[in-house]
Image (cartoon, rainbow, N blue to C red):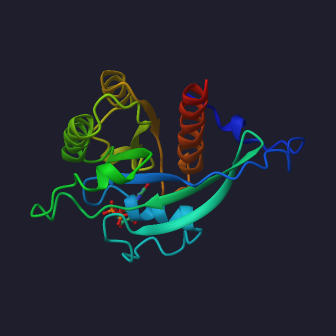
């Protein structure tokens, strides 16, 4: 896990890592209505237009952005998926081949979306076997305290079973959303380092 104090930017390594690397492709997965579009909009810097539904195609490049994590720049391309719940004709599998890492979203106010996240995790494991693909389980809408159906400890326990990281967020309050992206970058860097080692 990481704390928000990790997001403090240091300037001393600026300009050091000249090595050009292709952007990390991060895919948003999750049931309809959990906040994928809201996440994409925050990432794209358009937090005011939370109801926009511009991003529907699987594999569509929502946005590419350079963010700074632990004092070093990282390029991320965010890809949204279609609503796997409302559009059962199309399986989510194709999205699962395109990503370097996955944000697996559910809403803490919607137990069905939590179960859907488990299913997606299982599918992901089948599609990407034997690959240590970074995944973060994201419990969104934690601002909706009175409507909560999935507790923090349930989410954390589920992530432990899934062997992935866990974070609760509120896209509406812009709480922990960037921390989720930063956590993703840290995992991707660890994986890249272990590959190079
Ligand atoms: P998607 O179907 O997964 O893309 O979900 P959306 O991003 O379209 O979000 C569905 C609805 O939930 C929209 O009305 C959003 O404004 C709302 N929403 C998304 N994230 C949050 C959140 O963290 N808190 C609250 N209260 N509402 C949210």
Q: Ligand 1 is located in which of the four quadrants?
A: bottom left
Residue at image x 78%, y 42%? 71
**Picture coordinates of residue 40, whole percent (x, y):** 47, 63
- Count of residue discs: 0
Front in this rendered view, residue 130 or 46: 130
Give the side of residue 49 with respect to residue 119, left or right: right
**Picture coordinates of residue 62, whole percent (x, y):** 46, 68
**Picture coordinates of residue 14, whole percent (x, y):** 86, 48
Depicted 21 relative to depicted 48: above or below: above
User: Quarter of the image containing the N terminus?
Assistant: top right
Depicted 11 relative to depicted 163: above or below: below
Residue at image x 34%, y 32%? 151
User: Quarter of the image containing the C terminus?
Assistant: top right
Front in this rendered view, residue 130 or 162: 130
Q: Report if residue 172 is visible in the image.
A: no
Depicted 49 relative to depicted 36: above or below: below
**Picture coordinates of residue 65, whole percent (x, y):** 61, 62
Give the side of residue 52 with respect to residue 181, left or right: left
Q: Report if residue 156 is visible in the image.
A: yes
Front in this rendered view, residue 188 or 11: 188
Say which quarter of the image contains residue 135. Answer: top left
Q: Looking at the image, which residue sits at the far left? A: 89
Residue at image x 37%, y 32%? 131
Front in this rendered view, residue 145 or 137: 137
Say which quarter of the image contains residue 31. Answer: bottom left
């Amino acid at each position: 896990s990481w704390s928000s104090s990790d997001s403090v930017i240091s300037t001393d390594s600026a300009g050091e890592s000249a090595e050009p690397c292709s952007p990390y492709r991060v895919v948003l997965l999750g049931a309809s209505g959990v906040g994928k579009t809201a996440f994409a909009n925050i990432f794209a810097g358009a937090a005011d237009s939370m109801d926009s539904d511009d991003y529907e195609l699987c594999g569509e490049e929502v946005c590419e952005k350079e963010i700074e994590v632990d004092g070093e720049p990282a390029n991320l391309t965010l890809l949204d998926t279609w609503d796997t719940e409302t559009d059962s004709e199309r399986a989510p599998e194709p999205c699962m081949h395109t990503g370097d890492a996955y944000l697996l979203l559910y809403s803490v106010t919607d137990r069905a979306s939590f179960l859907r996240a488990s299913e997606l995790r299982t599918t992901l494991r089948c599609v990407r076997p034997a690959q240590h693909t970074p995944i973060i389980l994201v419990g969104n809408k934690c601002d909706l305290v009175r409507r909560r159906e999935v507790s923090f400890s349930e989410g954390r326990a589920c992530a432990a079973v899934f062997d992935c990281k866990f974070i609760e967020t509120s896209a509406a309050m812009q709480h922990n959303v960037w921390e989720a992206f930063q956590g993703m970058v840290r995992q991707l860097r660890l994986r890249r380092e272990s590959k190079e080692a």
